[in-house]
Each structure stands twice: as C-alpha cells, then as structure tokens.
Amino acid sequence: MLRRPLYLSALRRAIDGTFREFTRAWGETIEAIFYPLLRFLVWFEDLLLATPWPIIILVLCGLAYAGARSWKITIGAGVCLMVIGFFGMWEDTMSTLAIISVATFLCILVGIPLGVMMARYDRAQSIITPILDVMQTIPSFVYLIPVVMLLGIGKVPGLLAVCIYALPPIVRLTNLGIRLVDKQVMEAADAFGASYKEKLFGVQIPLALPNIFAGVNQTIMMALSMVVIASMIGVQGLGVPVLRAISNQYLALGLMNGLAIVALAIIFDRVSQTYGKRLQAYRETGHD
C-alpha cells in the first residue's frame, strides 16, 4: 500500500485548522450578515403557506399566462398544482417554491451584472470563467461542507448551496448574449453618440434578452435539481420526503414527491422557454 506523503497530511491539517479558526472568529458575523436574507425567506415561505390555495393557483396561472401566452401551458400548470394539493404535497411544494424563487432572484441579481462585466472586460472573463467551471463541476456535497461549517444547518446554508450550483448559467448566457449583439448595431449606436450606459441598457441588454432568459431557465432547472441535496442540511420542501423515502425505501413516497418536483420543473421550463421564444420573435420581427 502506498503511503501519502507527509507534507500532504500536514497541508490538509493546516487547511482544516485555518478554516476552523476562521469559522470561530467570523462565524457569528457572517450569520448576522445573512440574517435579513433569512428573515425574508421565512416571511415569503410563511406568506405562501398562509395564502389560500385557490389564490396561489390563480396567481401562478396568471403569471404562467403572462409569460407564455398559452392557454395549454396555463391550464396544465393549474392542473399540476391541483393534483399536488390533492395528494397532500401542497405545503412542501410551497416551501420548495419559496426557496427556488428566492434563489433564482439572487442568481439574477448577481449573475446579470457579472455577465455584463465579463462581456465588457476580457480580463474579467478570463478570471471568472474558471471559477464558474469549478462551481459547475465540483460535487455539490463538497461545497456543502464549508457552508455548513460557517452557517450551520438551516435555510440560509441551503439557499447559498442552491445559488452556488445554479448561478453559472445566467452568468455565462448573459455574457454570451451581450457578446453576440451585432457589431453593426453597436457601430450605429456609436455614430449617434450613445454613452456606454445608453448602449448597454438601450441596445445590448434588450437584444440579449433571449439568451438571458435562457440562462434564467437553466438557473431554475439547476436550482430545482438541488432540492433533494439541500434537504440534507435542513431545507424544508419536497426534498425532505424524497430523502426520507431513500432512507426507508418508501417507493410511493419518493415517486410522488419526485414527480411533484418534475411538475414544477416542467411548468417553469415551459413558461420561461416560451417567453424567451416570444422575445426572440419580437427581436426578429420588430413586433409582438
């Protein structure tokens, strides 16, 4: 049997010790920083749970129709939500919807500015791209370790884990969308004396919206795929029954809650994809 070199063991112990000391010194401060986010997440989840289910279904169906402009998708979303409620998975679904919505909002809030910065500065792209590669390829269980060590078990660590996993698509596709804007259009904007801010908000972002919404779509899908893993560190939702089903070999329980996650994924996917196609058609034809 080959022995590991002593310097590797020493390095590993040094890293563990340093991070442990950092956690003890700054853990409470970091928790205080994320406390407003925790309060907002708890408030939003309580709001969804306290609102009568017919109102929730009507609101979600209204949003689905506003995004997709399709009665088939809207009716399908309503039927899926009613079936979820009929089988007793409503509360878990609302908890999952709360964390996915907040995670997607945070990813958009952070991801679009990062994508814009990458599109403007090649050096920023060369620095950020490897970080995004690591975020996408590293096993999710690995970055759960430092998150849990810093913030413990609960909603915020789960939310951060979801955001880390779901952030790269929106950053990459925002960067790609802005870089793909026709150079002739940009030259025309320069000819009219447009400033960088005017070109960004008046030309580049509007023309890049289909790509940006494709990134939002992928971010939502990746966030939903983290639901079960996030349940391992105290996040309530559809992942908890699935995890319980895995532990106790309850096929029906795992299958039903897994299908509820699939139903949410299909609803979000169809609405965001259809909205992205509508934006693409608007860009190509000049009318809606």
Image (tube, grey):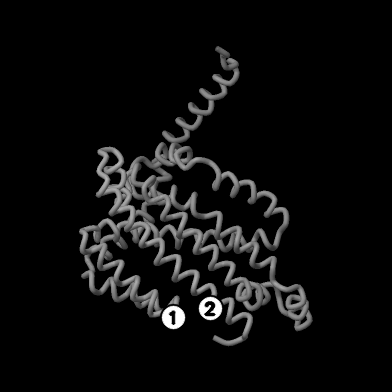
Q: Which residue is mark 2?
A: 278
Q: Amino acid at mark 2?
A: Arg
Outermost residue on the bottom side: it is: 287
Q: Nearer the viewer, residue 247 or 17?
A: 247
Asked if the residue at tag 1 contacts the one at tag 2, i.e. Cβ–Cβ closer than 8 Å, the answer is yes
Residue 237: in sight, yes or no?
Answer: no
Q: Which residue is mark 1?
A: 69
The image shows residue 180, relative to residue 154, as above or below, that is: below
Residue shown at the point (72%, 79%) measured from the top left: 194
- Answer with the quarter of the image where residue 42 lies: bottom left
- Answer with the quarter of the image where residue 210 lies: bottom right
Q: Secondary structure at mark 1?
A: loop
Give the side of residue 212 with respect to residue 126, left or right: left
Query: What crowding class fits label 2: few (fewer than 14 Cα within 10 Å), some (14-19), or many (20 or more)?
Result: some
Q: Position of residue 14 (x, y in %)?
A: 53, 24
Q: Position of residue 84 (x, y in %)?
A: 26, 62
Q: CA distance from mark 2 to mark 1?
A: 9 Å
Give the side of residue 65 with respect to residue 136, left or right: left
Q: Nearer the viewer, residue 94 or 31?
A: 94
Outermost residue on the top side: it is: 1
Q: Amino acid at mark 1?
A: Arg
Q: Position of residue 75 (x, y in %)?
A: 33, 76
Q: Position of residue 221 (x, y in %)?
A: 46, 58
Query: What crowding class fits label 1: few (fewer than 14 Cα within 10 Å), some (14-19), or many (20 or more)?
Result: some
The image shows residue 114, relative to residue 126, as above or below, that is: below
The image shows residue 25, relative to residue 77, as above or below, that is: above
The quarter of the rendered structure image containing the N terminus is: top right
Residue 168: in sight, yes or no?
Answer: yes
Residue shown at the point (41%, 55%) measured from the top left: 224
The quarter of the rendered structure image containing the C terminus is: bottom right
Give the side of residue 203 with respect to residue 29, left or right: right
